[in-house]
Amino acid sequence: MEGLYLYCVRKRIDIPFPFSTKGIDEKHEIRTFTYQDLEAVVSEVSLEDFDSEAIQIKAQNDLNWIKEKALIHEKVIEEAMRKDGKILNLIPMKFGMIFKEERSLKKALDESYERFKAILKRLEGKQEWSIKVYLVDIKKFEQGIKEENEKIQEKEKEIASLPEGMAFFMEEELKEVVSQVTDEELNNIVDTLFESLKKHTSNSVKNKTLGKELTGRKERMVLNASYLIPEEKIRDFKKETEYLNQIMQTKGFSLEYSGPWPAYNFTSD
Amino acid sequence: MADLLNTTANKNDNVTLVDALDKVLEKGAVINGDIVISVADVDLVFLGLRLILTSISKAEEVSGKSFSNTDKELTAEDIDYIKKLQKEIRKAEENIPKLIDMDNPKKTEQGLAKLVLTLVELIRRLMEKEAFRRVKRGSLSSAEIQKLGLSLKAVKKKIKEVQTIFGIEDEELNLDLGPLGNLM
């Protein structure tokens, strides 16, 4: 028995265009399923495989499996949103939704039809872009803070006059104070950044930052945000980002943007 | 960096992988499917052990007292001990730059050294937290604080020295516990 894995929903395109990516099972082709003026991008999956306990266990434990499948999901949607060098509006689905037959997919589309139409209308002429900020040079950042903080400077003088063993505790305590002050300053900077990037956008989301285990980078991620930007404002947004990146680099940060993304962050009602 | 006037995919592999995980697994529209593959909350799993560790050693309320409350004199024995510790610290301090200059870390024996050092470092951190708690509580004399501080500093320096011998970076002093994430 075969079911249907759902990637995204978009406005119906009457001239079909083929996908080069294979489906989530790495076997079946991607195709579309039309419903009124919408179409769902789907591919067949074996229900025996995908409705099994084995898959659910993998999805809970096997990080590599999760990574692989999530990437396929994303790749299919990336393909679905590009046509003739243009970005199409579509509604990306969350990972892992499967229908046992076309009939149940049709029913689900019917139930969500009004919601999907409303989302597509809201997304029209807009693109999702992501901003990630990393703290690259923590020493530079801390140094900047120490130089401006009199309390820390006083404490450092005090420590210099203590016997070594006692100084050890004071030093460790000072480290804590420094990291506390640093955290506060970090929050301020990140908040200000997030707000100032809103200027050219019509919607924004601050997501939780990702750990080093996930980014595979040594630097700590301090901001993970997504913005919905009208197409005509994207140039300004990019300029703003590059300008802010220059300022941030002098403080030890690096600001990176990427896009356009499927509007994952702007599909809720 | 992605170029935004160019509308074709232009994101480097790393960005795509991170973002794909971030977006695909957590965001996106939801519709009633017959089957839903539910993915583990990656963050939660990773956080698991670290949380246990921090709760074990969570510092008590700071009492607000000054560092020491008594002024017991150092005994001759104390002074000897302190001198010995200071000698150890100096020795390690002098040794580290020499070791770095040698530029010849014993990479072959690194694996075992890393494992042992990681455990020693973990214990050291737990001890240090406990020592802090007592110092802040104000129940120690200044002589005791002096001794405790020097002992901890000596161990710290010694670990640093052994790290240098084996060419182990600070970030490497950790254990990958698979799905539980890292030890420290």
Image: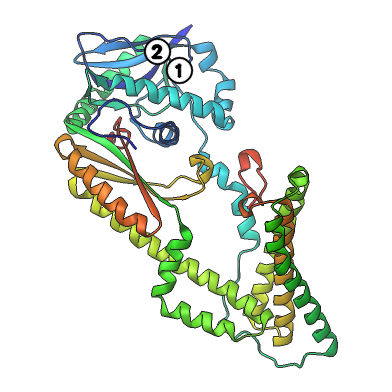
Toward which corner of the image does residue A236 lie, by quadrant? top left
Q: Measuring 51% from the left and 28% from the top, which residue is drawn there?
A: A66
Q: Is residue B143 left or right of residue A213?
A: right
- Is B46 drawn above or below residue A51 in the view shown? below
Across and down, in percent, residue B181 comes to 61, 44
Colour theme: rainbow
- Is B157 drawn above or below residue A198 in the view shown? below
State the residue in front, B56 or A262.
A262
Residue type highlighted by circle 1? Ile
Across and down, in percent, residue A92 comes to 32, 27
Circle 2 Cα neighbour tier, 10 Å, few/some/many (<14 / 14–19 / ≥20): many
Secondary structure under the numbered disc 1 in the rendered image:
loop
Q: Measuring 19% from the left and 39% from the top, which residue is drawn there?
A: A235
**Alpha carbons under labels 2 and 1: distance apart:** 7 Å
- Is B171 drawn above or below residue A78 in the view shown? below
Tell whether label 1 touches label 2 (CB within 8 Å).
Answer: yes
Same chain check for tags 2 and 1:
yes
Disc 2 chain ID = A
User: Is residue A133 at all visible to an observer of this figure?
Assistant: yes
Across and down, in percent, residue A139 comes to 48, 62
Toward which corner of the image does residue B142 lie, by quadrant? bottom right
Q: Which mark is residue A24?
A: 1
Disc 1 chain ID = A
Q: Is residue B132 left or right of residue A222?
A: right
Circle 1 Cα neighbour tier, 10 Å, few/some/many (<14 / 14–19 / ≥20): many
Q: Which mark is residue B113?
A: none
Residue type highlighted by circle 2? Ser
Q: Label 2, on which residue?
A: A43
- Is A193 drawn above or below residue A34 in the view shown? below
Mark with earlier residue (2, 1):
1
